[in-house]
Image (cartoon, rainbow, N blue to C red):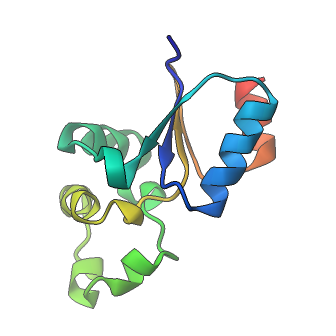
Amino acid sequence: NSMTILYGIKNCDSVKKARQWLEQHQISYQFHDFRSDGLSAHQVSIWVELLGWERLINKRSTSWKALDDDVKRAMSATTAIAAILTSPTLIKRPLLATRTQLIVGFKDANYQALLL
């Protein structure tokens, strides 16, 4: 049973690239779609704790831009968790979780260094 989980959304280009890379390198993984599979507060709070909300949230995303300026200014670990649970697409995609690490975003070199 693979402990590697790729979190994202199906139609995202970065997620597609990451999935292709994992398949090409025959790395078994489970795909978890934020939208259809959902997220738990527990899971998101662990990610925020390990990565920091600043690294977890994609500030170039439409979801971030749609947030109220006051909400953005007041963002903290606690409010980030609530915001992500409301709009999972705030998360920088893809998020790859292995037994020992979390990788945010897809870069060929990062995946190679950490997975091969």
Give the residue displayed 39% in from the left and 39% down from the top.
50
User: Residue 52 placed where, x, y %?
Assistant: 39, 51
Residue 44, compared with residue 90, is above or below; it is above
Q: Residue at x 19, y 44 (%)?
A: 41
Image coords of residue 84 (percent x, y): 29, 60
Work out whether residue 106 can be spotted.
no
From what the image shows, is residue 71 above or below residue 22?
A: below
Q: Which residue, as the protein is rendered here, is positioned at the far bottom?
A: 69
How many labels sit on residues?
0
With 71 as the anchor, is 17 left or right in this view? Answer: right
Taking depth in this image into account, of 87 and 54 the one nearest to the observer is 87
Q: Could you tell whether 42 is left or right of 14 in the image?
A: left
Image position, residue 114 (x, y; %): 70, 29
Residue 73 in sight here: yes
- Foreground pick, 16 / 94: 16
Q: Is residue 49 above or below residue 85?
A: above
Q: Residue at x 56, y 61 (%)?
A: 11
Query: Which of the 4 image quarters holds residue 40?
Result: top left
Q: Is residue 59 above or below residue 3?
A: below
The C terminus is located in which quarter? top right
Q: Position of residue 45 (x, y in %)?
A: 25, 43
Left or right: where 105 falls relative to 114: left
